[in-house]
Image: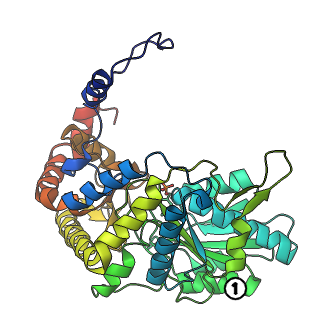
């Protein structure tokens, strides 16, 4: 499959079976998410019925285009229903949201709405956005595209937004204050009530990035897990993003963005008739839009229901406890902070005398790679997002991790591995 030269445009078409065989044959180096060897990118419910449903939905809506919802009222109906069901979960406005193509697009739109609100309602020419250093890079990307100044504030020792530092950073030109529920790097939930209050004092909007936790934390709360407040029950929270294609267990291309106030939702809408092609309108950034993720979001939520989501959240909680306890039991390793179930960073213990890491966590990650695990690297450790597909491999993972630490994670191991360069 992977050519060692740039291919010329094909002179002749190839047979379907030949191409399918080629596609399948070329996947040998792809991450093996089905066997629980990856920890991000694919949120695997390990549910054969759900997968069957996804395949049927994808085939059913493969060709439709959600550019014009009025051409496909079935999709419009499904979108409205998913938005209302999701808003119910978030204690939000059932008419205040839209589905987008993913977390990045939801965050982009939250920033655009805040910028336009600041300009139009508060007369701010150069809006700023204040957010913790742990907030997702999609915010930086949005600021870059939308000409909003991004002010990142270092987080506290617990990895959560530092309220006093945020207070010092917020000023009258602040359009948006952001918190995460939870943040991607450490899986901790920011102090949303405090951040929302700071925003409200300035008349700014407050977005909660629950792209990761929006479809998980509500079920963990119902399971009795202690959960800090983060959703629309918190006064001053003006919008929430929650990705259906993460812990909502949908396939890729579906995120929910809900605004408290429908006037803010309307700021997302773009209408244009200054060309001869008629009226063009959209509620999100895309033009032509795949239909399958919208149908899949509706089908997934309808299929799983509260009992299905509780079952999957319970599995995420169980495997997270197992991994967390296991990591804490390996000498030299610890889990960073106090994450909610699902997301965590595995870091090296710090030497009490010097504060330096007692082992090279990157080298541990390399050994894990060699053993077929794909843990993402962060500045301070290895990152894992856990799903039901990890239940069956948790023990194997922990024993490989212990072996990786014993063999290569200490300084002698690093020297052996890198010839002393490490
Ligand atoms: C907290 C958070 N926000 C936003 C995003 C961006 O989502 P996407 O990759 O779907 O655009 C992610 C992705 O992992 C995330 O974890």
> Taking 357 as reference, is 388 left or right?
left
Q: Position of residue 192 (x, y in %)?
A: 54, 81
> Picture quarter containing residue 335?
bottom left
Rendered view: 269 above or below 252: below
Rendered residue at 24%/30% (across/down): 28
Q: State the residue at coordinates (34%, 86%).
A: 226
Q: Residue beneath label 1, please?
A: 200
Q: Quadrant of residue 15?
A: top left
Q: Nearer the viewer, residue 386 or 334?
A: 386
What residue lies at 55% left-to-right and 56% top-to-bottom? 104
Could you tell whether 378 is left or right of 178 in the image?
left
The secondary element bearing badge 1 is classed as helix
- Choose between 297 and 131: the one closer to the eye: 297
Q: Quadrant of residue 371?
A: top left
Q: Position of residue 346 (x, y in %)?
A: 31, 59
Q: Is residue 230 above or below residue 413?
A: below
């Amino acid at each position: 499959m992977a050519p060692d030269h740039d291919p010329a445009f094909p002179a002749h078409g190839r047979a379907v079976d030949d191409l399918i065989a080629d596609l399948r044959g070329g996947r040998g180096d792809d991450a093996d998410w089905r066997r629980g060897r990856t920890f991000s990118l694919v949120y695997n419910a390990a549910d054969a019925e759900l997968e069957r449903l996804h395949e049927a939905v994808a085939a059913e809506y493969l060709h439709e285009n959600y550019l014009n919802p009025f051409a496909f009222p079935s999709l419009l109906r499904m979108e409205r229903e998913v938005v209302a069901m999701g808003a119910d979960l978030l204690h939000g406005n059932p008419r205040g949201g839209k589905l987008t193509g993913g977390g990045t697009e939801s965050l982009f739109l939250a920033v655009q709405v805040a910028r336009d609100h600041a300009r139009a309602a508060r007369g701010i020419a150069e809006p700023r956005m204040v957010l913790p250093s742990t907030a997702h890079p999609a915010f930086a990307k949005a600021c870059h595209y939308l000409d909003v100044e991004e002010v990142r504030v270092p987080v506290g020792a617990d990895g959560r937004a530092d309220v006093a530092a945020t207070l010092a950073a917020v000023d009258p030109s602040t359009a948006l204050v952001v918190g995460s529920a939870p943040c991607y790097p450490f899986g901790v939930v920011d102090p949303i009530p405090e951040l929302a209050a700071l925003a409200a004092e300035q008349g700014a909007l407050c977005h909660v990035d629950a792209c990761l936790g929006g479809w998980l934390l509500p079920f963990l709360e119902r399971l009795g897990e202690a959960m800090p407040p983060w959703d629309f029950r918190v006064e001053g929270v003006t919008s929430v993003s929650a990705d259906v294609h993460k812990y909502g267990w949908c396939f890729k291309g579906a995120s929910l963005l809900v605004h408290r106030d429908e006037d803010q939702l309307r700021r997302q809408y773009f209408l244009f008739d200054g060309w001869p092609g008629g009226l063009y309108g959209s509620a999100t950034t895309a033009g032509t839009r795949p239909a399958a993720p919208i149908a899949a979001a509706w089908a997934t939520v309808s299929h799983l229901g509260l009992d299905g989501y509780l079952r999957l959240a319970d599995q995420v909680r169980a495997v997270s406890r197992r991994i967390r306890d296991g990591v804490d039991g390996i000498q030299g390793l610890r889990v960073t902070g106090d994450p909610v179930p699902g997301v965590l960073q595995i870091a090296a213990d710090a030497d009490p005398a010097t504060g330096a890491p007692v082992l090279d966590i990157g080298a541990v990650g390399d050994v894990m790679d060699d053993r077929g695990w794909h843990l993402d690297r962060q500045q301070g450790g290895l990152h894992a997002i856990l799903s039901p597909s990890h239940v069956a491999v948790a023990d194997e993972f922990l024993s490989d991790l212990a072996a990786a630490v014993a063999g290569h994670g200490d300084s002698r191991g690093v020297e052996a591995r890198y010839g002393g360069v490490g």
